[in-house]
Image (cartoon, grey):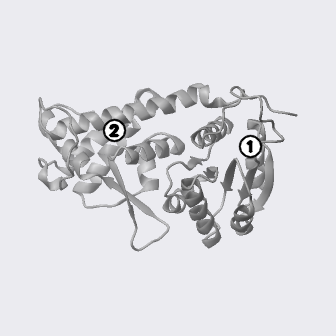
Amino acid sequence: MDAILTESDTLSYSTRPPVLVAGSSDAAIGRATRAVEAFGLRVGDRLAIGSARDRIERQAAATAVWIELDEDCGGPMDDLLAQVSRDVADGRYAAVVSASNQLVDPVMARLAESTVELIVDADDAERAVALAIAVGNSGMPRRLSDVASDQSAARLRQLSEEVSRIATTLARLSTGPGAIARAVEPAPAADGPPVSADTVRSVIRARRLRARYFSEEMFADPAWDMLLDLLQAEIAHLRVPVSSLCIAAAVPATTALRWLKTMVQEGLFLRRADPHDGRRVFVELAPHASQSLRRYFSEVGQVAVI
């Protein structure tokens, strides 16, 4: 049956380029297939991880590639993710990678392209939103069934606006009180006022204690939680892998990864490859973000920071 479009009636279900599905197991392929078909797109092929890379290379045109991972497939998985990341950067197709929580680090180590949508232990709604965002970013017209207009997608748009506001605020703080916000040249974190690790740990602990008395959802603030965690790690000279930062964000992993992506795009966070493990990426504060946080703690003094 033909799919109905909101912006064009010239493309139908049968004429739109297909989606290629690759999975680490039969069950994974089945989950991905259901997600793609529920969105109203046609599945062109169902592939095992080991054979997916060659098959995708031969595909003349595709709307998207969906990779579903419920186990670590080692080298073939790494190679496939790296290839898909490059293809998305080149505009060949959109891509969604759906993974289990234990695969966050090896997957993120290969996804250099920020427009690849990564979801973790996702439900049906998160899967639909991810595909809508990926297809939307690739310039495909929206569909009548496109969930990008639902509340989840609206929150994602608000995420970008909120991170932009945080970046502006940090830039203003790094220049001192009363200064006009402007681009800040990166400076070593040590140039900022000293902050003790105990101070930052106390703030993080106080934030977590709220969950004893109120629902955590009432206070979800992943950007601030990640900023605090990275500052604490910087002071203690520790490195933070992506998976640990997602835990610190105190929100579902998919939400944390979207915040992480946006914070990197805004220049607040930096990704660093682990020199000893090619399947892991560390995250750290950009120098100007570190300096801004240190100035913030210096200005608030003994006032409780929550």
The one of 246 and 196 positioned closer to us in this rendering = 246
Secondary-structure class at tag 2: helix
**Measured along the vertical axis of the image, is residue 214 above or below residue 253?**
above
Measured as percent of width and height from the top left, residue 17 is found at 75, 47
298 left or right of 285?
left
Secondary-structure class at tag 1: helix
Residue at position x 71%, y 61% from top? 56
6 left or right of 148?
right
Q: For the residue carrying disc 2, how many other residues have a C-alpha within 10 Å: few (<14), some (14-19), or many (20+)?
A: some
Q: Which residue is mark 2?
A: 224
**Measured along the vertical axis of the image, is residue 89 above or below residue 4?**
below
Indicate which disc, 2 or 1, sits on the residue closer to the N terminus.
1
Specify the farthest residue to the front.
10
User: Which quadrant would the C terminus be assigned to in this image?
Assistant: top left
Residue at position x 33%, y 36% from top? 207
Q: Which disc, if any, is residue 36?
A: 1
Measured as percent of width and height from the top left, residue 176 is found at 12, 36
The one of 69 and 266 positioned closer to us in this rendering = 266
Q: Quadrant of residue 203?
A: top left
The amino acid type, in three-letter code, at marker 1 is: Val
Q: Quadrant of residue 41?
A: top right
Measured as percent of width and height from the top left, residue 107 is found at 55, 59
**Measured along the vertical axis of the image, is residue 23 above or below residue 16?**
below
User: Which quadrant would the N terminus be assigned to in this image?
Assistant: top right
